[in-house]
Image: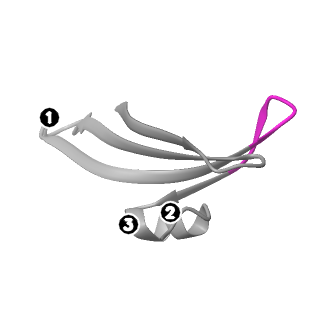
Amino acid sequence: MEFEIERISDCGGDDVFVAMREHATGALSEAPVGATNSAVITVRDGKVRRYREFYDESTALEAAGLSE
């Protein structure tokens, strides 16, 4: 499985918004699969304290306080 980061935005405070694509290959079928995901990651003292993954970017942006 691989992740390709498309965008990172500072949300202010301890949160960071990340838009990414996942790429993988089925273990038995070898079929390629992929998805677009977003995450809001909380970092404190240099450590990830919370990781929230979303499959809808607008929901992730709202959770990050970045929605319009």
**Magenta span of residues:** 43-50
**Could you say which disc has been placed on residue 30 in the image?**
1
SS assignment at label 2: helix
Expressed as whole percent of the image width and height from the top left, the position of residue 2 reads: 35, 29
Answer with the quarter of the image where residue 22 lies: top left
Q: Can you name the residue that lies furthest to the right here?
A: 45
Query: Which residue is found at the position 52% from the left and 56% from the top?
Result: 53
Instruction: Provide the major secondary structure of the magenta segment.
Output: strand
- Which of discs 1 and 2 lies nearer the camera? The answer is 2
Expressed as whole percent of the image width and height from the top left, the position of residue 14 reads: 76, 46
- Residue 24 is left or right of residue 55, and the answer is left
Expressed as whole percent of the image width and height from the top left, the position of residue 20 reads: 38, 42
Query: Which residue is found at the position 12% from the left and 40% from the top?
Result: 31
Other-residue count near label 1 (Cα within 10 Å), few / some / many at <14 / 14–19 / ≥20:
few
**Could you say which disc has been placed on residue 47 in the image?**
none
Q: Going from the N terminus, do you reach mark 1 or mark 2 first?
A: 1
Q: Which residue is mark 2?
A: 61
Magenta span contains residue 55: no
Answer with the quarter of the image where residue 49 lies: top right
Q: How is the image coloured?
A: one colour
